[in-house]
Amino acid sequence: MKICVGLSGGVDSSVAALLLKQQGYDVFAMFMQNWHDADATLHGDCEWEEDKFVAEMVARKLEIPFYFVDLSKSYRQRVVDYMFDEYSKGRTPNPDVLCNREIKFDAFLKVAQKMGADMVATGHYARIERVPSATGKGPVNDPQGADCTGIARPTGPHTIYRILEGVDPGKDQSYFLCQLSQEQLSKAIFPIGGMLKSEVRRLAKEADLPSADKKDSQGICFVGKVDLPTFLQQKLKSVEGDVVEVYPAFYESDALYQQQCDIVRSMLKDDYSGPLPVISHYISEDKATPVEDSHPFDDAKIAFMTDEDLRTLSTPLSYEAIKFETETYRSGKKHVRKTRWKENPFGKIVGRHEGAQFYTIGQRKGLNIGGHKDSIFVISTDIEKNIIYVGEGHTHPGLSRLCLRVAPDELHWIRPDLEMAVGETRRYRVRIRYRQPLQDATLLRREDGMFILFDSAQRGITAGQFAVWYAPDGEMIGSGVI
């Protein structure tokens, strides 16, 4: 069994290579360069060169062959260009998910296979289990397949590959693998998925690996730590526009918001007496406020939701009805004639920005808006009119949503044998961003796509990001673009 390790220069991939070498596999390392342009990186153009140098030293220490491959053209076409296109539409993509699907387990895998590799290993904190296919479908079982995950190889002609969360809850990276196919998983190995980060560091130090004390990488996958607005400005034009703060009074008069609240009320359990669950109490990974009833909805009532109700509930609010008019007034002893904005009970222009496409839902940094007691968050962007809408505080109504939709052509089933039929309803745990605690939700498959109804309202649901659903045992079942 010949295995190619994607050696990045970090401690995780280094220990992955170490474990495979210790288990007796024929291992070689390959470092991929995916980016040339250093204009937007914070550390200049030497960052990837430093990583390559460390990776080469690790390979020398482990006495395994080391190769270099330039995949920058594929990366730009299949990841970066997609990023620019999504941001230009006001959506927020996840480049790390795309990098895994399009580069590591596609372009990189193909190069590795040409060099004789049977499998590709990476330093992801996730686990793969291989089980016999109950349906007779799935990639053909390879009797020589790797067993470094500790899972016995199935004996049937076909195999189903399961992705499970990494054992270390603080480092789990399964979310970034949510778009992989069964065929890609059949060629993938994650040697450290069953380990804690502390164990990985310990093994690296015991083996005296050059990457043992290297800090974890940050920033866009294989681009490096970047200033995102500067990076995006390479192709997206900066145009100044207004920042509009939306007041809570807006929601009391907005027809769509009130309609959504009525639909939520219609789904509640008959004995539910708590507040209407349309505001998120989620602040951060360790500051979530418990809700009185973790599942306030009646499952029978949910099952009878119409497609129209689901579309209404999953539709983001629009703030284009908030208009501003000017008025003239006299100022000072000389009664100088001046112009000002008329007061609006629904909102106020509170600042300027350099382009709505550079901001994302839930963002609070980089707004430069003072004079508020609580934090200010982006709640919506209007790309056509170049307006950013913001709200004050974690419990601002515009920051929370209870339901999202994934279009039919954006659905991806990691487990195609478990794909939901149109009209089917299931309970799963869902994650809408990396490192977010898993959230209980009901998934409803309809002709119009997949609707995900959360038990608790979610903060900052963002178009372009990935929603990923997990089984109770931590297995990733499917994903889709919000």
Image (tube, rainbow, N blue to C red):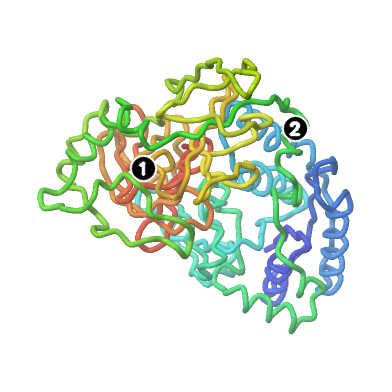
Single out the mark in the foreground, 1 or 2.
2
Q: Residue at x 44, y 54 (%)?
A: 476
Tell me the amino acid under the disc marked 2.
Gln
- The image quadrant that residue 12 belongs to is bottom right
Q: Residue at x 78, y 32 (%)?
A: 234
What label does residue 430 carry, if any?
A: none
Q: Is residue 444 above or below residue 197?
A: above
Q: Give the residue pinned by disc 1.
A: 419
- Per the image, label 1 sits on a secondary structure element best described as loop
Q: Nearer the viewer, residue 241 or 307?
A: 241
- Return the x and y of residue 436 as percentages of the image width and height: 48, 56
Q: Residue at x 44, y 59 (%)?
A: 437
Q: Is residue 352 left or right of residue 379?
A: right
Q: Is residue 357 left or right of residue 280?
A: right
Q: Residue at x 46, y 40 (%)?
A: 480
Q: Nearer the viewer, residue 175 or 475?
A: 175
Q: Is residue 465 visible?
A: no
Tell me the amino acid under the disc marked 1.
Glu
Q: Are marks 1 and 2 in contact (CB under 8 Å)?
A: no
Judged from this view, the residue extending furthest toward the left is: 270
What label does residue 233 carry, if any?
A: 2
Q: Is residue 30 left or right of residue 429?
A: right
Judged from this view, the residue extending furthest toward the front is: 333
- Return the x and y of residue 196 as percentages of the image width and height: 57, 74
Q: Is residue 272 visible?
A: yes
- Per the image, label 2 sits on a secondary structure element best described as loop
Q: Residues within 10 Å of mark 2 (few under 14, many from 20)?
A: some
Q: Is residue 384 above or below residue 407?
A: above
Give the CA distance from mark 1 to mark 2.
40 Å
- The image quadrant that residue 94 belongs to is top right
